[in-house]
Amino acid sequence: MEAAREVGALESAAGAVASRLATGRSSLVGRLIYGPRPGNDELQAGGRACAALDQATHPALTAALGCLAAGSAFSADDKLSEALRRTVAQAGAYGLTVPTEYGGCGETYLQLAHLEEALTANGLGPLAVEISGELTIGAGSLLGYGSEAQRRIYLPMIAEGRLMGFALTEVGTGVNAKKIQAYVEPDEDGNYRLFADGARNKLWITNATFGSLAGVVARIGKGGPNLGLFIVQLPLHDVEASEAGWEFHCAPSGVAAFTANYNSRLHFRNFPIPAANRVHGDGVEILFYCLRLGRCMLAAMSAGYQRMLAVDASRFARERPGVGGLVISHELPQLAIARMLGGSLQARSLAFLSLAQDAAGVDLAGLRDLTKSAAAQTGVESMMACEHVLGGRSFAQHSRVNAARVNLHLFGVVEGEDDLIRMGAVRDVTLPFVERYLSPLLSILHRANTDANGRVVAPEERILRLGLREFRRFPRRSLIALGRLLVTPGLLHLGAWICGNMVLDLARAASRVIPAGWLPAYRSLPPILRRHVRLAEWDLRQTRWTYLRLSLSFQLQLTSAQVALQRLGQRIEWLVSILALCHHSALQDPSQQHIADLQCLLLRERVDASRRGLSGAMLRRLRRALSRVAGDVRGERSSLFSRLPGEPYAHPWE
């Protein structure tokens, strides 16, 4: 019940963002699964934008590369240099998406993604990370929710290069924003005092340093139900209570990733915040608003990192003698380099498709999540492929390949943990179907778990699915639930949906004998990509039946069947990636179409292998085996743990 309350609060925040964005069209992923089919123009919008942007070089990129060539991009301790920041700020990098009336360049997020990818591909990933945070969850929060006065004060600062972080996570709190414990209390002057001390310290805050800006998420009142966002100008140095009656400390988080950036732990006690600095809006809602853009920028950065890895690995393979000739002459190194290129194109395709959808007012439900998770996964896989080509040289201490390693691994956690957001993507794209066809049926099962007074029965007495086991244990309640189920109109509605979709699928199956080149939907695609698109579209439509089968099999247990939901989310991610790759590369040169063809073949291998993993029998067997192992771990019975004490954690939260 506690989990349901937290999920409900997060869903409410996401729903409020959708209302604010006023998206005029339903989710692309939802339409690919449940119909109607999106047109090619919509699917290729990101590719068109990318092809146009590739024709020019942004002034900020030119300025940054000039610093890199001059050796002034990084300081002696491998941090981003102030000289680099000044140079790219003058070229408009920090204000790229800030409207011109606030001192920015007024460019689009598609242009920002193109710049982010280019910076990262040229070895300036830390600068891309800094600018992304600055403009998505920094300036983005003010553009979406700030007052006119707040925008006129802070957006010009950001455009000029003043760093801004988003202080959400804490020592005692990870990804669950509803668990935030930092709080503000009103003072006698009508302003606020911020308390973020001890386990409430803000932790892992990128772009936060002395003198920077920070958007701090805190509860309104200690233990209060509501979260607010407050713009804070961080002091220029640590401040003790004996000096000013309040405390502030800023220290490095001690994280091995993003080492060239500022990443800090922030301590506040009785810290003063003017009332005018409160951004009126729920803090979690504002986070959701900004995350849609942050996840797209992460995908663009992942694409750039993978291009960089491929360039360095290819140069090595073309110059390094191996066994029986140059390294590049052998198939396995060729495959490793192709994986890097394919992963880069996959991340780029999804990033530009998502941003084009956002610009067109389309709901990004599902797409924003799988864009991020696919980009993070391909980044790690490309890192491993690069290591196989370069061998020990990939670990050279001062190489840019080595510097990218930890960042690419961290991409799977920042902006949302991959497996969790894959599950969220499944939930988002199936929600309309669940609400219309399954909720009336599940409510009957829920009703069977309440007594005559409306109280929920004990956990061991609950019926989570109607099956033979439940009929043997609770025959009376199971029969009552079955009787109610058979007479509810919802069952007829579901039956009509099943029959209608079976007819449609039979018609589609018959049309599959027609060559793809004869059909208008595929004629505009390069011949080597048509089959991939056709198969991916078919498999995505079949996902309707997979989700229905899982729902009927697990029933109320589906909410806790994380393995099933994660695997289904992963399958949807691969299939949407195939479509994005094909439609994006259709507008690019033949070399990118060749990469897309190979990457689609590699993804098809995974899609085909996943069919067995989503079968009901295999899932039940897997979950039983997992339950046994997890029981041994939770009960401290695993012999592999014996005599191995765990190391205490950094930043203890107790």
Image: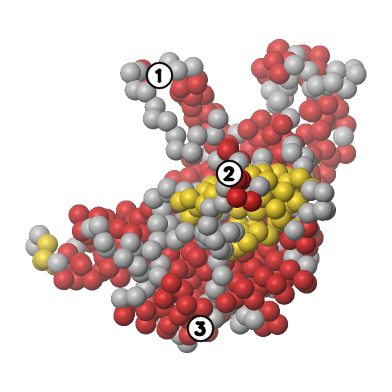
Mark 3 or mark 1, whichever is nearer to me: 3
Give whichever of 184, 464 is nearer the camera. Answer: 184
Mark 1 surroundings: few (<14), some (14-19) or many (≥20) residues within 10 A:
few
Residue 258 located left or right of residue 192: left
Q: CA distance from mark 1 to mark 2?
A: 35 Å
Q: Are marks 3 and 2 in contact (CB under 8 Å)?
A: no
The residue at which mark 1 appears reads as 638
Q: Is residue 11 left or right of residue 389?
A: right
Q: Is residue 326 above or below residue 291?
A: below
Q: Could you tell me which residue is drawn at 48 percent across and 50 percent down?
A: 251
Tell me the distance, in whole angstroms, between the alpha carbons under discs 3 and 1: 58 Å
- The residue labelled by disc 3 is 91
Quadrant where the image shows the C terminus: top right
Give the residue at x 70% y 72%: 153
Q: Secondary structure at mark 1?
A: loop
- Quarter of the picture containing the N terminus is top right
Residue 482 coordinates in the image, percent (x, y): 80, 25
Label 1 vs 2, first from the N-terminus = 2
Residue 546 seen in the current view: no
Q: Residue at x 55, y 66 (%)?
A: 163
Q: Which residue is mark 2?
A: 201
